[in-house]
Image (spheres, rainbow, N blue to C red):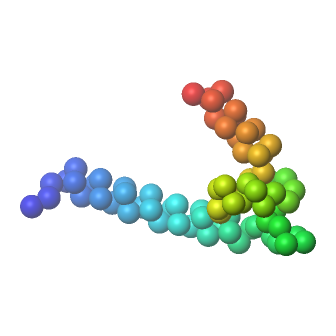
Amino acid sequence: MSDDADLANDTAELLNDIALKRHQGRVMQHQVWKGGGVCCTDCDAVIPPERLAALPGCGRCVGCQTAVEQESRVWR
């Protein structure tokens, strides 16, 4: 028999999974193929094939991803 905390945790986990899947879907929809390449969701620059091979499904170029990570460090 599960208690309220277990139920709340299960619900939160389910909602997080749904949000993640929605986000991944939006990233994939936003990526536009230009000349056989995938574009960065932030700056629309073509993401090099080497980056896509190393991180399949990535949505940002190295420069934009670096900027996002540096911004997140400032707020911690």
Please tell me in which quadrant of the rendered image residue 25 appears: bottom right
Viewer-side residue, 2 vs 38: 38
Viewer-side residue, 58 vs 12: 58
Residue 44: percent from left, percent from top: 85, 58
Q: Is residue 35 above or below residue 59?
A: below
Seen as rendered, the residue at the extreme right is 35
Please tell me in which quadrant of the rendered image residue 51 appears: bottom right
Q: Is residue 42 left or right of residue 6?
A: right
Residue 34: percent from left, percent from top: 88, 70
Viewer-side residue, 24 vs 18: 24
Q: Residue at x 90, y 72 (%)?
A: 35
Residue 29: percent from left, percent from top: 71, 72
Q: Is residue 28 left or right of residue 19?
A: right
Q: Residue at x 29, y 59 (%)?
A: 10
Confirm whether residue 59 shows in the render.
no
Count of numbered circles in the view: 0
Q: Is residue 23 above or below residue 76?
A: below
The quarter in which the C terminus is drawn is top right
Q: Is residue 55 left or right of residue 38?
A: left
Residue 66: percent from left, percent from top: 73, 39
Please tell me in which quadrant of the rendered image residue 36 appears: bottom right
Q: Residue at x 66, y 27 (%)?
A: 74
The quarter in which the N terminus is drawn is bottom left
Confirm whether residue 63 shows in the render.
yes
